[in-house]
Image (cartoon, helix red, strand yellow):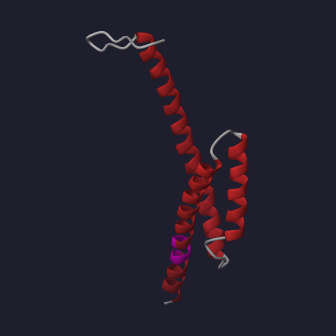
Amino acid sequence: MTTSNNAAGDVDPAVLAELARLRASIDNIDAAVVHMLAERFKATQQVGHLKAAHQLPPADPAREARQIERLRGLAESAKLDPGFAEKFLNFIIAEVIRHHERIAEDAVNGSAKTAN
């Protein structure tokens, strides 16, 4: 499959069909990633509530380091750049910690309101 270089700049219909097929696959993968992230954040929200209920810190650097190392290994075995995987997980971890901090703050504020 090659593109034709005629005066109108038309593209071979087979190339366009293959491009559409690949893009549809990418769109499906993107949808799956979003749904998986939503499920992950539902689970981490539960962790945040459990931590807040027991006055545990929002961040767990030892766990985070283990997870980063684990994800780097998974990335290597999947032929994905481990550095990219680490950056991706660090981004997610930062968002999770932000959620946990907000949950803890809400728990403290909620306790203060009920004490008054």
State left or right for residue 78 relative to residue 5: right
Which residue ends up furthest to the bottom in the rendered image?
116
Q: Position of residue 99 (x, y in %)?
A: 53, 66
Residue at 73% in and 41% down: 77
State left or right for residue 31 relative to residue 85: left
| Vertical order, 87 against 99 (above or below) | above
Tell me the magenta residue range.
102-106
Which residue ends up furthest to the left in the rendered image?
7
State left or right for residue 3 relative to residue 110: left
Depth check, front residue: 50 or 91: 91
Q: Position of residue 92 (x, y in %)?
A: 56, 57
Depth check, front residue: 39 or 81: 81
Residue at 61% in and 72% down: 58
Depth check, front residue: 48 or 83: 83
Question: Is residue 74 one of those drawn in magenta?
Answer: no
| Vertical order, 11 against 68 (above or below) | above
